[in-house]
């Protein structure tokens, strides 16, 4: 099976597909990246070849994925819709499909994974992160919206009610150590050890009989993943909230300060969303 994309670098080795996001310095989840992710997931469902495990990481040392492209929500939503059927035209429903893909998926995070970028990582089966530089966050509440692509569903199940409320309504950044302590991620590892650890685990799993691994994942998914109706509801609420005047005002304020461009605002977005004047 050939995996070739414009915004994802790929290579295969010993049953492991290394898929590295390469969609600009911020790895925004926009039209091109969603199109390639949809194609990748479709291939993993229809004809994965020898692939048993996928490792998802980033070419950028600063951004696993900053968030969705807030200037292209209808466009990337249209691309995400190609992964599902009627009623499933949302990034959330595409990521729900990713969560159920019949191989094991591992997010290896260096730098920032916020908003939709964090939701992409949460849709993977496991998350391992560099202790020195990984940052996680759902900043949407700071703009007047909410996580609309699975963040509420996954974080509530992983963190519990009170910590999920802290993480989502507080809209702040979580470093890798705190994310590990809260149960947001599997482990925080020293940056120098991250690659070898994840590759070793991936190849270990890829070497097991695939029928048992698939059955185990399917059973765990049935116990832990949200129902599609809940994902659709979050997506619809997000789209309604981002259209409100107050939300647009806050997003415009952030855009004027450097949102969606490499720089200090994106590096410290958890702090920036609380600095609205007035």
Image: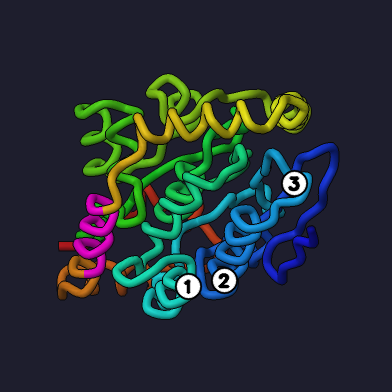
Name the residue that disc number 3 marks: 17
Identify which residue is drawn at 67% across, 24% down. 190
Left or right of 102 on screen, residue 21: right
Question: For the residues marked 1 and 3, what is the alpha-carbon distance in whole angstroms?
Answer: 23 Å
Residue 174, position as x, y percentages in the image: 42, 35
Examine the structure image and report whether residue 36 is included in the region drawn in magenta. Answer: no
> How packed is label 3: few (under 14 Cα within 10 Å), some, or many (20 or more)?
many
Q: Quadrant of the C terminus?
A: bottom left
Identify which residue is drawn at 71% across, 27% down. 209
- Mark 1 or 3: the one toward you: 1
Magenta highlight: main SS = helix
Name the residue that disc number 1 marks: 82
Identify which residue is drawn at 66% across, 51% down. 58
Residue 69, position as x, y percentages in the image: 45, 69
> How packed is label 2: few (under 14 Cα within 10 Å), some, or many (20 or more)?
many
Q: Secondary structure at mark 3?
A: strand
Give the extent of the magenta segment: 229-239
Name the residue that disc number 2 marks: 35
Residue 81 in sight in this render: yes
Name the image quarter holding residue 183: top left
Instruction: Choose the circle earlier in sequence order: 3 or 2.
Output: 3
């Amino acid at each position: 099976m050939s995996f070739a994309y414009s915004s994802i670098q790929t290579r295969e080795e010993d049953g492991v597909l290394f898929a590295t996001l390469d969609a600009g310095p911020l790895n925004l989840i926009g039209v091109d990246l969603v199109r390639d992710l949809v194609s990748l997931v479709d291939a993993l469902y229809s004809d994965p070849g020898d692939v048993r495990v996928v490792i998802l990481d980033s070419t950028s040392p600063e951004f696993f994925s900053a968030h969705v492209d807030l200037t292209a929500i209808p466009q990337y939503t249209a691309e995400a819709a190609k992964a599902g059927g009627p009623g499933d035209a949302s990034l959330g429903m595409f990521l729900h499909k990713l969560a159920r893909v019949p191989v094991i998926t591992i997010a290896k995070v260096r730098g920032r994974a916020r908003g939709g970028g964090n939701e992409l990582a949460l849709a993977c089966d496991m998350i391992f992160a560099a202790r020195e530089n990984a940052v996680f966050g759902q900043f949407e509440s700071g703009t007047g919206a909410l996580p609309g692509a699975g963040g509420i569903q996954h974080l509530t199940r992983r963190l519990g009610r009170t910590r999920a409320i802290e993480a989502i309504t507080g809209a702040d950044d979580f470093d890798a150590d705190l994310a590990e302590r809260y149960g947001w991620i599997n482990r925080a590892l020293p940056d120098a050890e991250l690659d070898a650890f994840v590759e070793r685990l991936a190849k270990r799993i890829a070497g097991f009989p695939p029928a048992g691994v698939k059955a185990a994942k399917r059973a765990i998914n049935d116990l832990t993943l949200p129902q599609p109706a809940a994902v659709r509801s979050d997506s619809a609420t997000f789209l309604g909230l981002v259209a409100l005047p107050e939300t647009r005002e806050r997003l415009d304020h952030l855009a004027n300060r450097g949102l969606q461009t490499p720089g200090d605002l994106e590096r410290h977005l958890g702090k920036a969303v609380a600095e609205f004047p007035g």
